[in-house]
Image: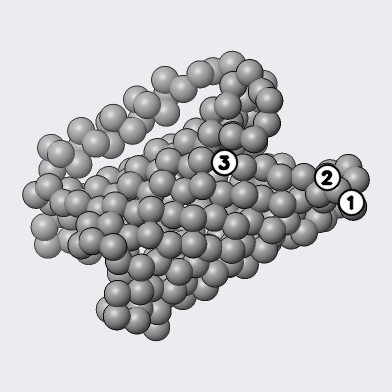
Amino acid sequence: MRIKRNVFIFLVLTILSCNASAQDDDFGLWLEAFANKKYSSSEFSLYSEFYTYNNNRSIDRISIGLEGDRDVFSFMKAGVGYLLMNKNKTEDYELRHRFYANVKFKWEVFNLRFSLRERYQLTRYPGHNLESPEYLNYWRNKMKISYEIPSCKVKPVIGVETFILTNKQVSDRLDEIRYSLSALYPLTDSTDIELYGLVAQMHDLNQYIIGVSYQIKL
């Protein structure tokens, strides 16, 4: 229990120590659903996302995606994915296409479960000239730590994710940092639900998110 308490305190202190220079605060709701199917050493996921913003008064985006991963070693996976997004852009919606490649690592230390995901993604969007689309390329680094509590189904998870912009000329390429705290609960042998809180710190905005993620193994 001391490990769980110390991990929680560390996350809270990290969030509180974030740079307080952001000009605005916002609140949103994120809903996610995943359907996963494993074939031998490969796994495929079909997933959907529904995000709100503007203090939960506007839809930010609705997305559907497909991802495939393959075991490289017992502790490592590699994969690719595609996400189609209907993105709210100043009260007008635009289709965005995202392509990405992942490398995922996992390891265990006693009751602690560590996971690291390295992702490079390219997002194509219309931009100002619809005939000359623009691109946003990011390197995303995501670390998660979960704790297996003996005789308890609920699994606490903390996470940190960074977004580094790679294809734009900007003074600070670290575009966003996300901190999360969640509770994962198995509904059945094949379904899980995760409730999480997330703080996304950007250059001019702090966004506070309440999210629900549902996963089913087919």
For image coordinates 48% across by 42% down, the residue present is 140
Q: Which residue is mark 1?
A: 130
Q: Amino acid at mark 3?
A: Tyr
Image coords of residue 196 (percent x, y): 43, 50
Q: Amino acid at mark 1?
A: Leu
Q: Secondary structure at mark 3?
A: strand
Q: Amino acid at mark 2?
A: Gly
Instruction: Determine the image quadrant of residue 82.
Output: bottom right
Counting residues from the start of the chain, the first of labels 2 and 3 encountered is 2
Counting residues from the start of the chain, the first of labels 3 and 1 encountered is 1
Mark 2: give few (<14), some (14-19) or many (20+) Cα within 10 Å: few
Instruction: Tell me if 160 is positioned left or right of 87 in this view.
Output: left
Mark 3: give few (<14), some (14-19) or many (20+) Cα within 10 Å: many
Q: Which residue is mark 3?
A: 138
Q: Which residue is mark 2?
A: 127
Image coords of residue 69 (percent x, y): 40, 66
Q: Secondary structure at mark 2?
A: loop
Asked if the residues shown at circle 1 and circle 2 are in contact, with their CB atoms under 8 angstroms apart, the answer is: yes
Q: According to the image, what is the colour scheme of the structure?
A: one colour
Is residue 1 among the parts visible in the rendering? yes
Instruction: Determine the image quadrant of residue 170.
Output: top right
Image coords of residue 194 (percent x, y): 40, 60
- Give the alpha-carbon distance from disc 3 to disc 1, as whole Å: 22 Å
- Give the alpha-carbon distance from disc 2 to disc 3, as whole Å: 17 Å
Instruction: Tell me if 101 is positioned left or right of 57 in this view.
Output: left
Mark 1: give few (<14), some (14-19) or many (20+) Cα within 10 Å: few
Mark on residue 6? none
